[in-house]
Amino acid sequence: MPKLLNLLLTVEHGMKKPVWDCTMCGQCVLHSTGMTCPMTCPKTLRNGPCGGVREDGHCEVKPEMRCVWVKAYDRKVSLPLPTVWKEHYNDLRPPVDMQLKGTSSWVNLITKRDQQTPAGWAKRQEETHSH
């Protein structure tokens, strides 16, 4: 089984790195971010841009780089993505579980490992949606 998991990880990284600059966080959210990997943000922000986005849409940390979230929004609007994916753009994403870095998001999705969240997160989610 470990050989199969290693093969799957190699295939996943081989596909996602060149196309989406995937960092193999193990908790892929490409489908909800306009096929833009938020982990490429220098601040690894998964829920939208920081307050430092420049007027030209570039990053405050790396001025030569367009803000990941500006790209994500542009792609959400312009790419022929399924409507359900576009609706997930504004979802509140849980904090990154750094223990999953370097693991297969495909395996983590199937095993639901990527859905495990910090204690109290579900309650905060409910409170956010009820207001």
Image (cartoon, rainbow, N blue to C red):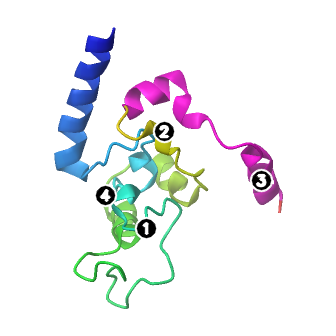
User: Of callouts 3 and 1, which one flags the residue occurring earlier in the amino acid sequence?
Assistant: 1
* Discs 3/1, front: 1
Q: Is residue 93 above or below residue 25?
A: below
* Discs 1/2, front: 2
Mark sitting on residue 99 = 2
Q: Quadrant of the N terminus?
A: top left
Would you say the residues marked 3 and 1 are in contact, meaning their CB atoms lie under 8 Å apart?
no
Q: Is residue 79 magenta?
A: no
Q: Which residues are magenta?
A: 104-130
User: Of callouts 2 and 3, which one flags the residue occurring earlier in the amino acid sequence?
Assistant: 2
Would you say the residues marked 2 and 4 are in contact, meaning their CB atoms lie under 8 Å apart?
no
Q: Label 4 sits on what residue type? A: Leu
Crowding at dot 2, Cα within 10 Å, few <14 / some 14-19 / many 20+, comes out as few
- In percent of width and height, residue 93 lies at 57, 52
User: Is label 2 in a helix, a strand or a loop?
Assistant: helix
User: Is label 4 in a helix, a strand or a loop?
Assistant: loop
Q: Residue at x 28, y 13 (%)?
A: 4
Q: Nearer the viewer, residue 90 or 108?
A: 108
Q: CA distance from mark 2 to mark 4?
A: 32 Å
Mark sitting on residue 43 = 1
Position of 37 with respect to 44 (left or right) is left
Mark yes or no: residue 48 visible. yes
User: Of callouts 1 and 2, which one flags the residue occurring earlier in the amino acid sequence?
Assistant: 1
Q: CA distance from mark 2 to mark 3?
A: 22 Å
- In percent of width and height, residue 123 lies at 80, 47
Q: Is residue 117 above or below residue 64?
A: above
Q: CA distance from mark 4 to mark 3?
A: 32 Å
User: Of callouts 4 and 3, which one flags the residue occurring earlier in the amino acid sequence?
Assistant: 4
Mark sitting on residue 79 = 4
Q: CA distance from mark 1 to mark 2?
A: 18 Å
Identify residue for label 3: 124
Q: Quadrant of the C terminus?
A: bottom right
